[in-house]
Amino acid sequence: MRKFLTSLVIILAAPFSIAAGGPSVPLDHIDNDLTDTASLQSGAKLYMNYCWSCHALGYARYNRVARDLNISEELFTEFLMFNEDKFGDHMSNSVPVDDAKRWFGTAPPDLTLVARLRGTDWLNTYLRGFYEDESRPWGVNNSVFKDVGMPHVLLELQGLCAEKPEPLGEAKYDPLTGSVITTGGCQSYSIEGSMSTAEYDEAIYDLVNFLDYMGEPTKLDRIRLGWMVLGFLLILFIVSWLYTRELNKDIH
Ligand code: HEC
């Protein structure tokens, strides 16, 4: 009995210990929507063009992703596949690990499961968190990944933030007029990108949405099934309740 109670306490306390070890840096929250297929398609396009050359998606297959994202085989093979792979292959790349370690200090990890490991808020902050830092080999640092080995590969889109971006939602006010000057994010750019801040945030929304889908392609099915099971239990409860009432009628 004592063993049972100890195990129960450990199990119940586990989520709190994980929460206690949480991030010390504030993260920019994202409410992504896995049912938004257009966003997932746009995320896939960004990923294959800007990320896949370094980060494989080795646990996923092209044909499954194409089916889930409602992209035809012709379009997928023509615009989203960049080597001789077959449509049914895993989405691996051929980055030479030893060379990559030399170039970046560490080999770029596979990102199939990164959303489950890091969480979507962290990814949203990380991908919007690059800023200029001349002391680093690639001239950039990151607000949630200090001394990161990855270059700012989306610089042409975002531009280069001159200083560490601030957490979103922290409004600053003009001392004279009292009006809001900023609600966080990048405050000034040392290089302009091709996108506005809002457009870049939107692109990162799509990218994070895609990585979230990648981490658990059956998430939507699982949620749908969960509701169906709850619905079934509810019906079962009503039927059992009516039945018990019927039986008890004769007793009283
Ligand atoms: C030129 C190669 C390269 C490209 C292209 C690239 N990355 Fe990276 N990335 C790296 C390297 C190297 C690391 C490891 C950094 C470290 O550990 O210091 C990394 C790390 C990461 C991490 C952190 C992984 C973790 O959990 O530690 C994420 C997330 C990530 N990259 C996302 C992306 C996304 C999204 C793109 C496309 C927009 C992208 N990367 C493009 C090289 C690259």
Image (cartoon, rainbow, N blue to C red):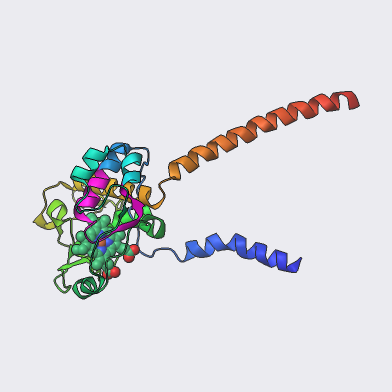
Seen at 24% across and 56% down, the residue is 52
Report the side of 211 relative to 94 (left or right). Answer: right
Query: Can you tell me which quadrant of the image ligand 1 is in?
Result: bottom left
Residue 190 screen position, x and y as percent: 10, 59
**In the rendering, at what x and y percent does residue 235 appear?**
64, 30
Say which quadrant the C terminus sits in. top right
Residue sitting at x 36%, y 50%: 214
In depth, the one of 225 and 70 nearer the eye is 70
Q: Examine the structure image and report whether residue 96 is included in the region drawn in magenta.
A: no
- Looking at the image, residue 100 sits to the left or right of residue 234; the answer is left
Q: Determine whether 240 is above or below 88 in the image.
A: above
State whether residue 16 is above or below residue 230: below
Looking at the image, which residue sits at the far right?
Answer: 251
From the top left corner, tell me how far across and down residue 100 is, in percent.
22, 70
Disc tally is 0
Q: Say which residue appears at 27% left-offset and 69% top-offset.
A: 107
Where the N terminus falls, by quadrant?
bottom right
Q: Is residue 114 above or below residue 104?
A: above
Residue 146 in view in this figure: no
Residue 45 is a magenta residue: yes
Q: Nearer the viewer, residue 54 or 178?
A: 54
**Range covered by the magenta-colored residues:** 42-62
Residue at the image point whose x is 61% and y is 62% from the top? 11
Q: Position of residue 51 (x, y in %)?
A: 23, 56
